[in-house]
Image (cartoon, rainbow, N blue to C red):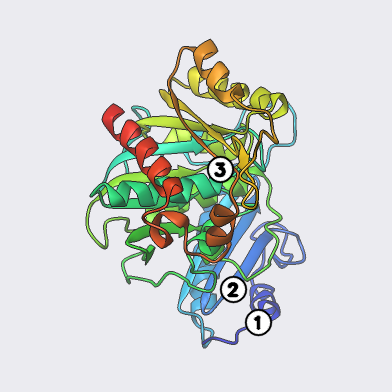
Amino acid sequence: MSDVKREELLEALKTIKHPKTGNNIVDQGIVQGLVVREGAVGFALNIDPSEVEEMEKLRQSCDRLLLQISGISKVTSVLTAERDGTDEPAPKGFGEKRAFGGHGTPPPQEGPGGIPGVKHVIAVASGKGGVGKSTTSINLALAFSKLGLKAGIFDLDIYGPSIPRLMGLPDARPESLGDGKITPLQNHGLVSMSIGYLMEKDAATIWRGPMVMGAIQQMLRDVKWDLFGSIDVLVLDLPPGTGDAQLTMVQNIKLDGAVIVSTPQDLALIDARKAITMFDKTNTRVLGIIENMSYFICPHCGERSDIFSHGGAHLTADEKGMDFLGAIPLDMDIRKTADDGNPIVVSQESSPLTKAYIEIADKILAKL
């Protein structure tokens, strides 16, 4: 295991000077988001859009320098550019490059494309945090596996990645395949990727929007999703809201549809409707709504309590003219198995809760 420290890498990068100012790139604030984990380094260079060509050469110099350090086996660097808020247009040609992570790679010219080795892609969104979207995502992906499909899950939540823990792989990391590609991680028969596999444990991702967008684009390009065989369904676990990650997704990934997860109460449904509106505006098909934490059954007396109200997601589905996919109760077994990295669909195969997830997955599969 590599014991290279972040400070050592920063000291090395200080030997590289900006081609115009002559200042070292660390003290000038160009190097951002540098992380190192078991020999894998990642960072961004925040540049002026007018300097993209020379800074691309500088980026390559940084990579070569860091790869010379003992214990470093992989370096992933990207360029990002932040506008100053004026109305001045970007330099000619800059708009043809990705805002972040592109290495000069042009975006798709005819709309978003598919992911190599993946047949179907569905997004799971909530609009609001705290509704159990990631737990729903992982159990849906595992339910697809139970239906005989090869499934995967892609964690797009850069600020709060949950998939490593839910997969039971909190300390795992990808390996380099030597051709610019990295391996996805696999457990429970499920293939996965998350920024959480690439970051130091408990590290905060303090990144601006362009860096988030670039990280997603880079994982899409660099991960060999079909390493363990062609994937039938890839589930995208989206972060809350309708921001940079969602925009990057719809611009770069050809989606077969989106699933909305919400709890029944009005406050959550307000944001769920915003997520539906976002998908409508980006011409993405919404496959239906799941009501999570729909009700609670007391394990001692058997009495039912509608803690977050009940039926609101079903009413919203009717209002929006879309399918209601099913209801998942608020249950301690779902929470405990998720925390243990052994989600209920694989750890309690005969549970009625597992059956509920599989029935929802079956409905989605029929639409695909």
Q: Amino acid at mark 3?
A: Lys
**Residue under circle 3?**
133
Q: Which mark is residue 252?
A: none
Which residue corresponds to the image point at 50% horizontal and 82% vertical from the top-left?
68
In the displayed structure image, the side of residue 320 where residue 266 appears, left or right: right
| Real-space Cα separation, disc 3 to disc 2, in angstroms | 29 Å
| Real-space Cα separation, disc 1 to disc 3, in angstroms | 35 Å
**Residue under circle 2?**
36
Q: Residues within 10 Å of mark 1 (few under 14, many from 20)?
A: few
Q: Amino acid at mark 1?
A: Lys
Q: Quadrant of residue 195?
A: bottom right
- Report the front residue among 99 and 165: 165
| Disc nearer the start of the sequence (2/1) | 1
- Report the front residue among 126 and 35: 126
Which residue corresponds to the image point at 32% horizontal and 46% vertical from the top-left?
144
Above or below for 265 versus 298: above
Q: Residue furthest right?
A: 27
x, y (%) of residue 286?
A: 44, 24
